[in-house]
Image: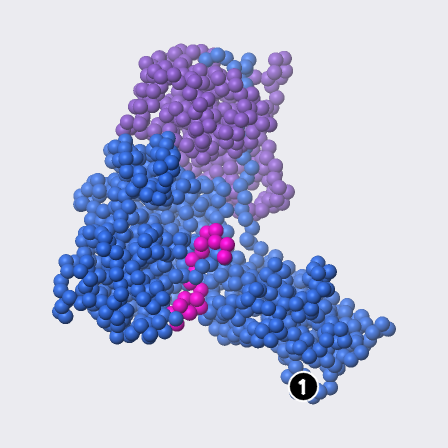
Amino acid sequence: MTVDQHIPSPSGSLRPSGLCAGYVPPSTVFDEMEERDGSVRPHWNMFINLLDDLGPAELGRRWETAKQLIHDNGVTYNVYGDPAGMDRPWNLDAIPILFGADEWTRIESALTQRAKLLDLIIADIYGPQRLLHEGLLPPELVYAHPGFLRPLHGVQVPGNRWLHVYAVDIGRSADGQLWAMGDRVQAPSGAGYTLENRIVISRALPDVFRDCRVQRLATFFRTMRDTLRAMAPHNRDNPRIVLLTPGPYNETYFEHAYLARYLGYTLVEGGDLTVRDNAVYLKTLGGLQQVDVIVRRQDDDFCDPLELRQDSSLGVPGLVQAVHAGNVAVTNALGSGMLETPALMGFLPSLCRYFLNEDLKLPSVGSFWCGEATACQHVLANLHRMVIKPTFPGTGMGLVFGDSLTQQRLDELRTRILTCPRDFVGEEQITLSTAPVLVGDRVEPRHVVLRSHLVASADSYSVMPGGLTRFSARADSMIVSMQRGGGSKDTWVLSGGPIDTFSLLQPAGQSIELNRSGGDLPSRVADNLYWLGRYMDRAESLARLARGILARLADQNLENSPELQLLFASVTRDAVKDETEDQQRHPEQRLASILFNDKYPQGLQSTLASIYRLASLVRDRISIDTWRIINRFDRDFPPAGAYGVQINEILPALDRLIITFAAFGGLAMESMTRGYAWRFLDMGRRVERSLSLLALFRATLTTSIEREAPLLEAVLEIADSAMTYRRRYLSTLQAAPVLDLLLADESNPRSVAFQLARLAEHVEQLPRTASAARRSPEERILLRMLTGVRLMDVQQETQLGPDNHRDRLDQMLIALTGDTYALSDSISQSYLSHAVASRQLGLDRPISGALPGGGGGV
Amino acid sequence: MPQYRIRHLTRYRYDEPVSVCHNLAHLLPRQSPRHFWSYADVDISPTPAIRSERLDFFGNRLTLFAMQEPHRELEVLAKGIVNLDPPAGSSGGTATDLFGGITNWSWNQVRDFLTNNPRGDDLDAFQFLFESPYVRSFQDVHAYAESSFSINRPILEAVTELTRRIHADFIYDTKATTVSSTLPEIMKARRGVCQDFAHLQVGCLRSMGLAARYVSGYLLTAPPPGKPKLIGADASHAWISVYVPNMGWLDFDPTNDCIPSDKHITMAWGRDYGDVSPLRGVILGGGKHIVDVSVDVTTL
């Protein structure tokens, strides 16, 4: 396949001007934008003109906004072993790569053929194995492949279709030829990132995007939804489809959450699913709900610890048997991952003729499986210019570039290959084409690879008009990898005809059954939301307390201010172990270390980190806007080191943080539907707020000090109730009315009583298994607490005992605190503790010893 | 024709209730030459919520079952009666007697034959040439195996000697290894049980380029001289099979240095223990658990 012949554009041979004026691709490679003679390829003309009309300044300005959008949307890619943290921001280039309509039509046809072929191959391997019996495929590639999952052999999959989603990496060599460089079927990532890239670029360049007549991506995802729905063995009108992720430590977890939300599927981990009666169920708060289709984003051998890898903690015990029983469909079918072996590539041309009676339209890069003697000789003779790959996964060997090895290393590699040739594949390196990438305020060439996505349609495959283009980190590097610091581009396929502006976000034509339950909340997600709520409020309480102290430290001395000492003690009481060291330091420094030291688990920094971690676990459950708020934490409150101990720097940061918390609370109140997700988030907040209020009262109000007014004022301020108090009591500050307002007044949203009343409402609405006539343990605890608070006589409780201590109040606060912890435990017990890991039973091993009379000679 | 009754009881007891368990058993006998089963069944207690059976990739009978109610104990009892039609020789006979003929194949001819475009039965044997989850690191056993495989040596002679050497060089010891011991560990310990010796010999044969499989079954044992045979004193057994073109699969027992004939009862075979473990499962809950196994093989 070659690109269109160069047709001079109407305006003659257009040379890049403006932004691209200084663009000089290497002369030995194919450049996607420029012809060899330096003129712009025709299908780029319009784009370059529009970009130049925009001007570099405007492009730069828009690009800054776009980068902010990427940050705010929290687009990340986990880099294994990156000490700087697991989420690395997504690197997207401002300039898309363009494909003309004619060339794309040929690419589409070639990719469709390849997908069909791979589907036929894998169906044969798990079925009749004609390819092995007729000698068309070396049996090692099946029998020696650890990804050949024997328990799946002979299984009937819906429509005998094994591949539903498929991705292929495509590169272009110097002569313009396109080559397949790798097939992705295990968990083909990239479609979600492609979508996100498109959203960012089309927002940054809306006019350019429109005028270039770029084909839209949404139709592809509609086909995906239709295909997955049609796979459901039962309940085809409204099947339950889940996206199975290995979890947030996976490199593409962002995409799993993103796609689940975009497609409207439940994001689950293996532990959220259980097999009952040979069918798969999702564990939700409302009970078990049957799952019809699993879109898996984890390797197939990890999917069932009973029949597949027994060391997998990610799987669903019994899944294979559920698939055999036909009660659930899994995509891509379990077992299909073995198609990714690079050894297969060399056999595709003959297999294509065998199955389809056609020539393979998209050639693979020159690929030589060393299990064949002649291929092995070729690889060994050309080792210095080959890429050596492992035939089978799990060997611990990555790619080896022959041209980067010393003679000694080459010899070692040669010996390794000769020891077990079938374990190695040699691939020819192609000099990848280049495309312009925005670097600072100019464009530079970088090598590119396109990951193209396909999805099964009725009896064929549909190609996404676009894809994830990745580029190398440097102009002189052919290594194109997000793991190694490269970047990505949006891919524009220009249209010859009308543009289909269908959007998945718009209502579709046919009406669906109305459903308001939302009872599909997995218990694990409820657990995460509950703790997200708790940490949110813990951070807010801490920020308010710290602000109250810091504001006073500015004009008061700790030594001669008893109320400050009490407040200070309430913050630092958990940090006892550093006491000796801390005593030497200024109060501000000690406070700052509690706020900023991420080694201190009760500190603000650690709490914010927990919020970020929990929020990323429930990404598919929280809105984009909420994400943006959570992403502001690191802007509002950068980690320690960025800060000195200057009060004038900390205070504004705390102010901003408290406003951000208010924004979060407001969004949760205003835009979350009153389902279980909201209830658990809110219960977490209420429980935590009760606990921090009770702790504040115990630290400040149980012992009376001489001048109590400044202390009471501080408590009111920290509890955000100073205004209400002043309106009611003007300026008379006394313990009894303060306690009434903060403890007993159910109309004050900052009072303990208010939290308890809200909690009582929540627990009443939670699903329950026992008969409804009896109160649940949570209801009973809350009833006891609320009754106690309602019956409380504030005047009496605040009376001072002999040693200036309010014993009765202290007892009551202790009891309330204990009950709040009991309530939290009870909620966890009843609703959240399903996340128990399953374990392997101990194995009996054959240990039989001797035959009668001992061994006989053979 | 000797007739045996087999009784294989596995009992798990848990400290805390198990809410769900999924199990997989190879406790029903497969079709195999010279074995005639008049009866075979598996009783499970408590009664499983669901029970299914299918043939696995190797043609073994696989029983799958699941409990979905809390339980503190699981009992699986496999019972069977089998008539064995042994070849002309009996335990202690020579390979020629027991396999009913001789083969002129040298081990290296077998090796070369298998890798050269195998079809049919040979293709089926081909899959037993490779590493498998319990039989890895061929390089660690290759040197040990090699001395029995001088070039052009007849394959039966070579495998017979390897069987004898393993029996002589390795001490039977139930404490030295575990169910998941690897080949290097077994080589280092020079001790083990039948499972280890079978894995070891399978590894040796595969490291030489021969197709070898792991056979799971039972063995008729005798009590110590002068003592009565105790109930439940037996155990499940394991040995190996090696493939010779035109003759098929030939069994060898490295634990007893013999060729299985009239006292070895075949239940299942696969690449290694992992393919044919008699019973395994995944549980939710349960705390600590203990497992008791008792096996009885009696002559009828």
**On screen, residue A423 above or below A192:** above
Q: Chain of mark 1?
A: A
Taking the image as shown, residue B56 lies to the left or right of residue A175, namely: right
Tell me where residue A799 appears, x and y as whole percent: 81, 77
For image coordinates 48% across by 73% down, the residue present is A671
Q: Is residue A348 visible?
A: yes
For image coordinates 78% across by 80% down, the residue present is A707
Q: Is residue A79 inside the magenta stretch?
A: yes
Q: Which residue is mark 1?
A: A726
Taking the image as shown, residue A88 lies to the left or right of residue A128, namely: right
Tell me where residue A263 appears, x and y as whole percent: 38, 62
- Tell me if mark 1 has few (under 14), some (14-19) or many (20+) residues whose alpha carbon lies within 10 angstroms of its own: few
**On screen, residue A807 above or below A730:** above
Quadrant hosting residue A148:
top left
Bounds of the magenta segment? A65-84
Quadrant hosting residue B125:
top left
Q: Quadrant of the N terminus of chain B?
A: top left
**On screen, residue A476 above or below A855:** below
For image coordinates 53% across by 21% down, the residue present is B170
Q: Is residue A515 visible?
A: no
Residue type at mark 1: give it. Answer: Arg
Tell me where residue B207 appears, x and y as whole percent: 40, 26
Q: Colour of chain B?
A: purple
Q: Is residue A476 inside the magenta stretch?
A: no
